[in-house]
Amino acid sequence: MGLKRGHRANPFEWIVERAIFLIATSAILMVFLIFLFVAREALPVFLGQTNSSLVQEVLPVAKMDTLSPAELQKYLGLTPKQFRELDRDAIQALMEVKLEGASELTKDKDAAVNTTQWRYMLLPHQWSDYDHPVFIWQPVSQIHKYNIIPLAIGSLKLTLVALLFSVPIALGAAIYVSQLAGNRARELLKPAIELLAGIPSVVLGFFSLIVLASFFQNLLGYQVRLNSFVAGIALGLAVIPVVFSIAEDALSSVPRSYTQAALALGSSRWQTAWQIVLPAALPGVFAAVVLGFGRAIGETMVVLMASGNASIVSWNIFDSTRSVTATIAAELAETVFGGHHYRILFMLGTLLFAVTFLSNLAANRIIRGLKSKMEGKR
Amino acid sequence: MNLKNIIQTTALGLLLAVPMPSALAGSITAKGSDTMVILAQKWAEVYMGKTPGTKIQVTGGGSGTGFAALQNRTTDLANASRKIKSAEIAECIKSFGKRPTEYKVALDGLSIYVSAENTIQELDLEQLEKIFTGKIKNWKAVGGPDAPITVYSRENSSGTYEFFKEHVLKGADFAASAQTMPGTAALLQAVAKDKNGIGYGGAAYGAGAKHLKVKATPESPAIEPTEETVVGAKYPIWRYLYIYVNPAIDKGETAAYINWLRSDEGQKLVKEIGYYPLPETLRNK
């Protein structure tokens, strides 16, 4: 341990060191446990243990006396503890409710389908009432349709628009602030751009719902007022400060000797910034973009308010769109705990986590590769 | 409670904002339908002014949230803009051994909203069904200008969504291109700003866009949602608003409160908020 090496640590220092260690581990533990919890809730979907089929066996209430307690408990879907606690009247009421429930059910030809299987979640299917196979997300419906393709496309589309809008702006600003601007301009610009990060995303969402949406519709004349373009731009505003501050740090930490050498050899400030400093800072700039991607794909409030939330399969950026995050936020509160809709939303959360994790991992790899190449180590 | 449980609860709390248990003496909590929040708050306010010492807390979240809270016994009253489902009754029985008691507390006529610029004045139920399921895509098909229809709907967690789906769409799915809005106010805001938009919502939020007259069949007369037409069941899209309560606690203060809601005095407030009072036959004397 660091503190012991030079001299005998005094007990107070030892306690402080332990406390800091504990805090650090608990943060890691917390992240790990949250992921564990989310994954555990989603696990039945991955293992194919969920069943949304609406066809179920029902028995007349009179059967309640002929069934053995174990059969009765299984039929009513009770845990042993619940079964012990319920009295005869309650059991009878449950039998009645189960019958009522069965009579409410639809006669739809798809009623027996377990829609939580992967082929219904990933491939198009022709449901009754539809004239061709479709990708469709309609979880609250007679037949629960859980196709996640429209949501995946929605999230990717929004992220793409946000990055296309924000990365050039943020990088341009970073290059200007770190390389070209004078001292006074830099001191003004840097905090101003970073202030953007302080705008709560719900405010940004509200702003785009009321102001941006009308502004762009008047300007560009498209038909759907709330669409992935508007939401993407608003999302971009949230991404700019993330990309800007990391890219600016990367550019500023390029050794001054590079700049000095380039200027001494007669290149202009712009040539130095563009051809010497930017390539040298590339790994950091790349990391900035990847973190921007993570921010964009995980953002919820802006998207929920400004994207229109229609779950359609379309790559047109002027169509309304529904993202994975907005879906989870809008639907989770209403689902039956432990039901299939609940589990599928957790499954979406797990996928989202996996995507950001993998993109960060890939970025890390690439950055390391670039760095060693740049520093001449192969 | 072991450590794992505590951490799981914390994690869940972060995700879902775990409801706080109520059940303080002399206090009543009501949770559920967002449509009913304003009405329930008004009731609570007036009742608390009338009977000092009673505390009533009202929260929204959606009808389903109210039922979930009723099952977990974290609320006394569940406000609902739809009837309870059999699966939810079953959960209640599992939790407290009895069916929850249902009280009808008000009527609501769902208005169909379009932008004030729209020239359409009336639609029939069949046209509405086709518009909201995406079979009619242009205003021309229903006698309007040649312009595409933008359909606005509610999130599928809303009781209004389910009611509309069941009664107007007859159980069919909403068009995939229907945009879903997080609340009636947001929906109305969107329709008011979109000259090709159409949406639906509770009558209480009617300002800002215009509402259409609705015909039950193409031949029947077009009816405007007013107190007379909704209470008389002439306007075709109406529903009851409900309160559900665990029969074990439906006594004393809680029972008195529910009684008062259904009295002439409580029903007068329903009208003030913009919903429709119960017909005389359903009230408490």
Image: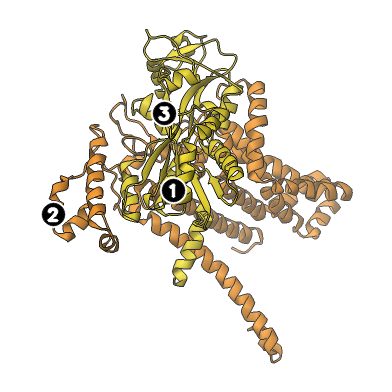
Chain colours: A orange, B yellow
User: Which residue is drawn at the image coordinates 24% and 53% (left, top)?
Assistant: A89
User: Which residue is drawn at the image coordinates 42% and 50% (left, top)?
Assistant: B251
Residue at disc 1, secondary structure: helix
Residue at disc 3, secondary structure: strand
Q: Is residue B175 visible?
A: no
Q: CA distance from mark 3 to mark 2?
A: 39 Å
Quarter of the figure with the N terminus of chain B:
bottom left
Side (left or right) of A374 relative to A73: right
Q: CA distance from mark 3 to mark 1?
A: 35 Å
* Tag nearer the camera, 3 or 1: 3
Q: CA distance from mark 2 to mark 1?
A: 43 Å
The amino acid pointed to by label 3 is Arg
The amino acid pointed to by label 1 is Leu
Q: What numbered label is drawn on residue B239?
A: 3
Q: What numbered label is drawn on residue A348?
A: 1
Q: What numbered label is drawn on residue A65?
A: 2
The amino acid pointed to by label 2 is Asp
Proximity of marks 3 and 1: CB atoms separated by less than 8 Å? no
Residue at disc 2, secondary structure: helix
On the same chain, marks 3 and 2? The answer is no
Query: How would you rate the neighbour count of disc 1 (Cα within 10 Å): few for under 14, some for 14-19, many for 20 or more?
Result: many
Residue at mark 2: chain = A
Please provide percent x and percent y for residue B204: 55, 28
